Amino acid sequence: MVADNKNVHVLLVEDDTFLIDIYKKKFEMEGFKVSISDNGEKGLADIKKKKPDIVMLDILLPKLDGFVVLEKMKADAETKNIPVILLTNLGQKDEVEKGLKLGAEDYMIKAHFKPSEIVDKVRKVLKL
């Protein structure tokens, strides 16, 4: 359990630079430490190397899609306990179910949530 946001490291795995800027600013304004990975391959490497407290993971990514990243991450003893929130525009029921079955804590459709609601969800998952 992390006492305050300042030591909470959020890894954003997202390829949309516009959204990266918005989410990064919002998390930093709220006192979180933020790292960015702009493709699935880099995201997976950063998860192993940086061991963030939580991962915000898009599904449609270059190099490796988010489902593959999630699957590999959950299969690795070193990273399997890091919570993941899928943050995507894919909202089909089967995609949501697949993400949760692969081990995501939650599934958020980007268009349905404001950045502040996304930060609140991270706090809730991490019990801050």
Image (cartoon, rainbow, N blue to C red):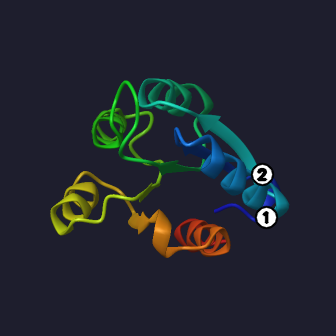
Q: Nearer the viewer, residue 53 or 114?
A: 114
Question: 109 above or below 43?
Answer: below
Residue at the front extreme of this rendering: 18
Identify the residue under disc 2.
7
Q: Position of residue 124 (x, y in %)?
A: 57, 74
> Horizontally, is 111 left or right of 66 in the view?
right
> Horizontally, is 3 left or right of 23 in the view?
right
For mark 1, give the secondary structure.
loop
Question: 76 above or below 60?
Answer: above
Mark 1 neighbour density, 10 Å: few (under 14) some (14–19) many (20 or more): few
Q: Position of residue 16 (x, y in %)?
A: 55, 43
Instruction: Pick the quarter of the image with the C terminus.
Output: bottom right
Residue drawn at (61%, 51%) of the image: 19
For mark 2, give the secondary structure.
helix
Residue drawn at (27%, 56%) of the image: 99
Q: Position of residue 38 (x, y in %)?
A: 55, 32
Identify the residue under disc 1.
4
Residue drawn at (20%, 56%) of the image: 98
Q: Position of residue 27 (x, y in %)?
A: 73, 58
The image quadrant that residue 28 belongs to is: bottom right
Name which residue type carries label 1: Asp
The image quadrant that residue 17 belongs to is: top right
User: Could you tell me how far apart the alpha carbons at marks 2 and 1 are, in whole angstroms?
Assistant: 7 Å
Mark 2 neighbour density, 10 Å: few (under 14) some (14–19) many (20 or more): few
Instruction: Pick the quarter of the image with the N terminus.
Output: bottom right
Q: Mark 2 near mark 1, Cβ–Cβ under 8 Å?
A: yes
